[in-house]
Image (cartoon, rainbow, N blue to C red):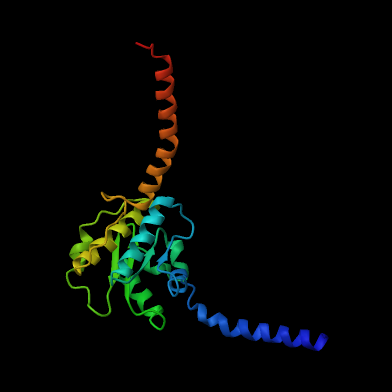
């Protein structure tokens, strides 16, 4: 048993030694975006609505053929050991794309308080700078997430792909239907009871 325990411990140490270099240079987003479509600021508060809207917009864009990874960078702290790229969104977008190229070779969008960075390995970024320059970036973590949502929608539109930024903008959603049914189940019996009470109180002719 003791020998088996020693062998397991040695295997764990070896696995750790092998896995350590895989974390790269300490850039959090390059680790996270290997498997996830959106990197969120490490120590910043973003509203649940803004998080949900960006995540769902990225998912809808992917489903319509416009796949993109998004890094929301609120402060230099989010860059880990590459803080020298703070406030350099375009250079950081190229850096991220290169860092995860063995796992993901598609579009990369970065939003920082001072602007956007965008990389599209297959189609290039000709004309996309003008698209991004028209988008205002709110100076808060939630503002950054909202700007990223608008950017994904605008970039997809520039490629001929319509992606609404929110499912609540005009159409009737499943949530609307469920809310309506719930209200009906509550209000209809109340209305019926009130009508019956009025009829009971009404004098007979």
Q: Does the rendering let one see residue 88?
A: no
In the rendered image, residue 38, in percent from the top left (x then y), is placed at 40, 65
In the rendered image, residue 44, in percent from the top left (x then y), is placed at 46, 54
Quick check: 114 left or right of 9? left
Name the residue: 43% across, 42% down: 182
Name the residue: 40% across, 19% down: 199
Name the residue: 42% across, 62% down: 76
Q: Is residue 119 above or below residue 199?
A: below
Position of the N terminus, as image quadrant, is bottom right
Q: Is residue 53 above or below residue 23?
A: above
Residue at the front extreme of this rendering: 205
Quick check: 18 left or right of 39? right
How many discs mark residues in the rendered view?
0
In the rendered image, residue 185, in percent from the top left (x then y), is placed at 43, 39
Of residues 128 and 67, the one drawn nearer to the viewer in this rendering: 67
Position of the C terminus, as image quadrant, is top left
Q: Does the rendering let one see residue 154?
A: yes
Q: Which quadrant of the structure image shows residue 18?
A: bottom right
In the rendered image, residue 149, in percent from the top left (x then y), is placed at 31, 58
Q: Which quadrant of the structure image shows residue 153?
A: bottom left
Of residues 1 and 12, the one drawn nearer to the viewer in this rendering: 1
Of residues 193 and 129, the one drawn nearer to the viewer in this rendering: 193
Name the residue: 27% across, 50% down: 169
């Amino acid at each position: 048993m003791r020998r088996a325990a020693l062998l397991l411990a040695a295997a764990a140490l070896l696995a750790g030694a092998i896995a350590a270099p895989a974390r790269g240079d300490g850039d959090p987003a390059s680790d996270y975006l290997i498997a996830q479509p959106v990197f969120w600021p490490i120590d910043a508060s973003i509203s649940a609505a803004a998080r949900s809207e960006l995540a769902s917009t990225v998912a809808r864009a992917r489903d319509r053929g416009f796949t993109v990874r998004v890094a929301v960078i609120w402060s230099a702290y989010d860059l880990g050991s590459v803080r020298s790229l703070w406030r350099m969104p375009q250079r950081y977008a190229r850096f991220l794309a290169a860092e995860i190229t063995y796992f993901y070779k598609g579009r990369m969008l970065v939003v920082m308080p001072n602007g956007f960075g965008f990389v599209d390995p297959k189609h290039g970024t000709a004309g996309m700078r003008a698209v991004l320059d028209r988008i205002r970036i709110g100076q808060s973590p939630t503002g950054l997430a909202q700007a990223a949502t608008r950017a994904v929608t605008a970039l997809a539109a520039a490629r001929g792909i319509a992606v609404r930024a929110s499912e609540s903008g005009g159409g009737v959603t499943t949530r609307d239907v469920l809310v309506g049914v719930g209200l009906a189940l509550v209000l209809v019996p109340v209305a019926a009871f009130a009508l019956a009470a009025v009829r009971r109180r009404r004098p007979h002719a």
